[in-house]
Image (cartoon, rainbow, N blue to C red):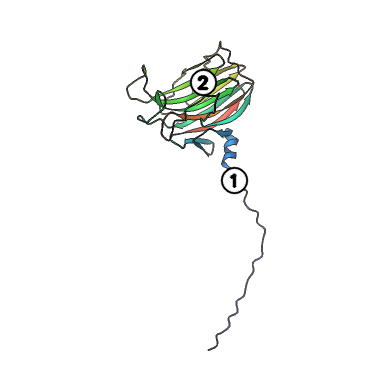
Amino acid sequence: MPRAAVAVALVVAPLFAVAAPAPKPASAELIAKHYGTTAGDGAEFELSGTQLTVRSTFGKGNHSFNWADRNPVPRTVLSARGDFELTVRVLDAVPPNKDARHDGHSAETRAGLYILGGQSSFRYYLSQSYQRFPGAPQDGKLQRWLGLEANYPRGGASGSVGRPEDGKSTWLRLIRKDKDVSMSHSADGEKWSPPNNPFKNIDMSIPDEVTVGLFFSHSTYQFAHATFDRLTITKAK
């Protein structure tokens, strides 16, 4: 039996030139827009809105800040000149595991700000640790404070310069005026502690142009992270 031929009408739709959607900026470009370029070893950087999370990726202590040598600490990098205020909010920083294997005297994480220029460096940070050296509390409780470390041509200093409020995120600020650096902190970003300058009578030898940014480091053999919000550099008041 012969088959019936079926006529099929082909409808060809007209072609229109449609512009492809603009590609989203690369993650590194977005991070650079808000925080500067990224540097350091063993970490990844993730931006969500204005919040930047720095996450360790190899489960090993990443605590060195030896400026004379290769510096592995995960950080962001910007240039600043003259007088300025460098501010950031530490939204969340993971404390160390109490029994984590660690380098140094304690299991510790640090999240904060830094200034680097010439032979001088400053680090102002939220520290969380279980102390294990003579003279430190041995009650097994997590210790939280705002720490400072500084190096300059003829010496260095470190210590506690404040305490964060429990249950609240911490705002940190480094203030550079002329050749002096002071620090201040806040629990709400509005009411700030009086600027503290432990180096008032010391020649810090700070050049006009310096490198600044945020950093996250830890002394433990574990994975850890910290989340920051709204790093800003403004003219010093």
Q: Position of residue 218 (x, y in %)?
A: 45, 29
Figure disc tally: 2
Give the residue furthest to the front.
69
Mark 2 or mark 1: whose residue is earlier in sequence: 1
Q: Residues within 10 Å of mark 2 (few under 14, many from 20)?
A: many
| Residue 229 position (above or below residue 181) | below
- Mark carried by residue 184: 2
Q: Can residue 41 be seen in the rendering of this structure? A: yes
Q: Position of residue 96 (x, y in %)?
A: 40, 30
SS of the residue under disc 2: strand
| Residue 169 position (above or below residue 194) | below
Q: Position of residue 211 (x, y in %)?
A: 59, 26
Left or right position of 209 against 112 = right
SS of the residue under disc 1: loop
Residue at 49% across, 36% down: 43
**Which sits in the foreground, 77 or 153?**
153
Q: Residues within 10 Å of mark 1 (few under 14, many from 20)?
A: few
| Residue 127 position (above or below residue 22) | above
Give the residue furthest to the bottom.
1
| Residue 200 position (above or below residue 81) | above
Residue at 58% across, 43% down: 26
Three-letter code for the amino acid on which mark 2 is drawn: Ser
Q: Position of residue 55 (x, y in %)?
A: 47, 36
* Circle 1 residue: 24
